[in-house]
Image (cartoon, rainbow, N blue to C red):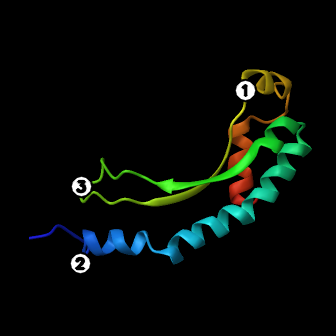
Amino acid sequence: MAQKFKGIQAAKLNALLQSPNVRAALVARARRSLPRTRALALSVGAEQFARELHIETGTRPGTKADQGLRRPYARITATLTTEQRKRDGRTRMTRRQILRRGAFGG
């Protein structure tokens, strides 16, 4: 008997989560947040960080979930070298604060 997640079989739920519509909705939300996050980074003086912001998509492995639920994600990230971090080191907000405020519209 297959494990169930509130009345839905885990395999069906995984199929729903991997659908193009769900992935497109996640990417659309990240695309809406990206300009706001860039503007916020520039306003606090983190020019290097603002230039390096991009959207990363993927699927969580589901190894911790009881049902093996593999959830897709789309998130805004930035890959910075140590030198780039030093240039933006005196900003008024941390990179984590910038990402959090950009995501929630603050």
In the picture, the quarter occupied by the C terminus is bottom right
Say what amino acid the circle numbered 2 marks: Gly
Locate residue 55 relative to residue 1 in the image: left or right.
right
Q: Residue 37's spot in the image, x, y percent?
A: 78, 52
Which quarter of the picture shows residue 15?
bottom left
- Whichever of callouts 3 and 2 sits on the residue coming sooner in the sequence is 2
Residue 51 visible in this rendered orientation of the protein: yes
Say what amino acid the circle numbered 3 marks: Asp
Instruction: Give the labeled residue for mark 3.
Output: 66
Instruction: Give the labeled residue for mark 2.
Output: 7
Instruction: Give the labeled residue for mark 1.
Output: 81
Q: Residue at x 73, y 37 (%)?
A: 95
Observer-nearest of 96 and 68 = 68
Q: Element type at marker 1?
A: loop
Q: Residue 65's spot in the image, x, y percent?
A: 29, 53
Q: Element type at marker 2?
A: loop
Which quarter of the picture shows residue 27?
bottom right
Q: Residue at x 32, y 60 (%)?
A: 69
